Amino acid sequence: MTVYTSTDLPTKLLTLINVSAAKPDTPDAKRARLSVPFTKIRQADARAKIAALLKQQQSLSFQEEAQPALDPTSTTPTAPTTSTTEPDPFHIHFASLGSHGKAASALATAQASSSTSSSTSASLAYTLAKSNHDGLGDTLAYNTPHSLPITLQDRLQETVRTAYHSYLQSRHHRPPTTFQRSTLSLLQSHADLLHSHIPLTQHEEVRETVSAHLLSHVQKTRRVILRNNERLAKAAARDGAKVKGGDAMDVEEEEAIKEGGGANDDLDEVVRDQGFTRPKILVLLPLRNSAVAWVDSLSSVSGCVEGLVNASTKADEESLSISAKRFLRDFTLPEGTLDRLAQPDAVSRFPADHVATFRGNIDDSFVLGFKVTRKEWRAYARYYDADIILASPLGLRLAIEKDDDSDFLSSIEIVVADQLDVMQMQNWEHVKFVFSHLNHIPRKVHQSTDFARVRQWSLDGAAPHLRQTILLSSLDTPEIRALFLPLTNVAGRRRVLGGGGEGEGGGVMGRVRDGVRQVFAKFDCANAQAEGDVRLAHFTTKTLPTLLKSAIASSKTLIFVPSYFDFVLLVDHLQKLEEKGELKFTSISEYSNNREIARAREAFFSGKKDFLVVTERFHFYRRYVLRGARTLIFYAPPLHAAYYAEVAGMPFAPSQSSSSSEEVVEAEDVSVQTVFCQFDFLRLCGVVGRKRAMRMCGIAAVAAEENGGEEEEDGGRRFGEGRGGGGVEGEEERDGPSKKVWRFV
């Protein structure tokens, strides 16, 4: 049975008492149940029902059944049938007493294991890892996207589908791409999704697809509630009882129901179609400029007559609503502000990903609620009145801690976290904090909550097992994996393994200029918890002494540190050595101001300082070219694989001045060394490629699993790119016609 803590048990019992009070036993009483005062319900009957419910939950057991064989690689849709004969996966997954709802309630009382398999989809252009909960058998119908019996067009809500296609035609002059159709079909299975290999060129397609999925969910949920409101109202009018609706209907929504021609008055079953609170969708974004892009997509596919369409441009500001003008004022740069990344030469001066991430308003603290009606997309709605909440992790955490209230997140049914790679460059603790506050039973009884219409699985505390989580990122990290793996959605988990890009293929070493010596030094670490201390000990006792003894590497050395915590420890150690007169160094971090940065860069370039220590976050936010280095040391493989090639190319960057006396740097004068251990596997994949990373880290089990059972052996202690000489013994590997020789020592 469900384990309740001492703090949530009273709330749970109070909730069940309220539900019991509002849930009559006879069919005739069902139609007038909302008008029955609580005083007419005997406390003994309520307690008896609670005891019976708990006893029933204790007796639940599941026998593992074989799932029907499905072909997840098929790109041909199943023959379309009418929606009257085939159920909508939305109703299967979110219905109060549907198959998924029952499975979720059971999962809340038992520990279910999961099984994982991999398959390749040509239409999705990536490999998909699927995880389903064992022991639930055929309860999980439609738990894979390709088992959906209806075509894509029939899965979207009608208004959203029309708006989605119109939006794509007006913006891109094309219908949905094969990738968008396949991804939307995957999303509509309501399984959790982790896509950690989204290229910059495909980010907009993913955003448009997810937006259509979110708005379809909101409109379907709203339509169900409105139709049930009418059913209850008609039943109450016929029985002479006054019935209170779950969500207050707007005038235009009442008109929409009337235009729909009425609803079925059959009330044989109790109507349960809501959560504890109204917000259904949570979209986590790192910066305000990301919110502008998402609002454009969401409002464009919402089907509302009035929205925030084209809010990212001020060309037609006069035609915008008051809320749209306020949104522009709050989420774009103030009038007259110069955005250096919006200038024509920005693309030539900065990488494309930097321009896309930091162009516009880059404030990282905001929370914004949106209410969706038939005619209007209303921004700045109160949290408890909103259907969709757009927020940054920092902004949402501040809002929760300010009022000590997270009840408005209790009924979130879909959560989207976009640009997780950017969030990891902020403060990952904020992301973990937000996810830890999702789908808890409210601590307070809110006026808008109609307990008689709260879904059964919400009352059972099983909402986390029905919530769909969509995690989007351009790179794969252990932190993102740790966020994804504990998810317990009964529809399963889907993880994109990659599409042959940097994380799956040959890495970024090919971008480094030929002739540059690249060495990868491995150290042993048996415990992941002690990895930071072991890395520091290895660097200070092995790597650094070697650098100081070298006539070349003892000066003009740039040390690139991905983690700020490692940066602090390393700088502290170097300061002690500097006090002893053993070296001269300077450092730059993301917290350094412009004056400190300029002083450190000048001291290193002029030779006043032999070592320059920088953090990856500094490079992420600034993207400066640090000239003067000849030896480049990566304290650990960078989180962003592209930074490896960028840093390795800094010695060859031309000076902005036209001085003819500038020193010409030869490739043979530059060397790159990376320190790593087996826990750096994911980062190493982006740098050297997956196959080499497995060989370097000695991951035979992973190699066997993902290479058709073909095991790979440990490549040894040191992996370097030589220049074909030196008389070093070891295993060599050549990249085809390339002159590069990979050497294991």
Image: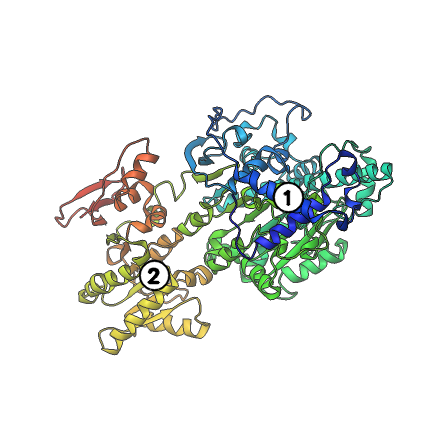
Q: CA distance from mark 1 to mark 2?
A: 65 Å
Q: Are marks 1 and 2 in contact (CB under 8 Å)?
A: no
Q: Helix, strand or loop at disc 2? A: strand
Q: Which mark is residue 15?
A: none
Amino acid type, mark 2 = Phe
Percent position (x, y) of residue 118? 41, 33
Amino acid type, mark 1 = Ala
Percent position (x, y) of residue 603? 34, 73
Count of labels shown?
Answer: 2
Q: Is residue 352 visible?
A: no
Residue holding disc 2: 560
Query: Left of 723 or right of it: where is 253?
Result: right
Percent position (x, y) of residue 33? 77, 42
Q: Helix, strand or loop at disc 1? A: helix
How many C-alpha atoms fall within 10 Å of the one at disc 1: few (<14), some, or many (≥20)? Answer: few
How many C-alpha atoms fall within 10 Å of the one at disc 2: few (<14), some, or many (≥20)? Answer: many
Q: Residue 397 appears in which quarter of the rendering? A: bottom right
Q: Give the colour scheme shown.
A: rainbow
Query: Left of 726 or right of it: where is 556?
Result: right
Q: Nearer the viewer, mark 1 or mark 2?
A: 1
Q: Is residue 704 visible?
A: yes
Q: Nearer the viewer, residue 288 or 317?
A: 288
Residue holding disc 1: 48
Percent position (x, y) of residue 723? 20, 48
The first of marks 1 and 2 along the sequence is 1
Residue placed farthest to the front in the image? 44
At horizontal 37% and vertical 64% (from top left) the residue drawn is 565
Q: Residue 558 appears in which quarter of the rendering? A: bottom left
Q: Nearer the viewer, residue 235 or 503?
A: 235
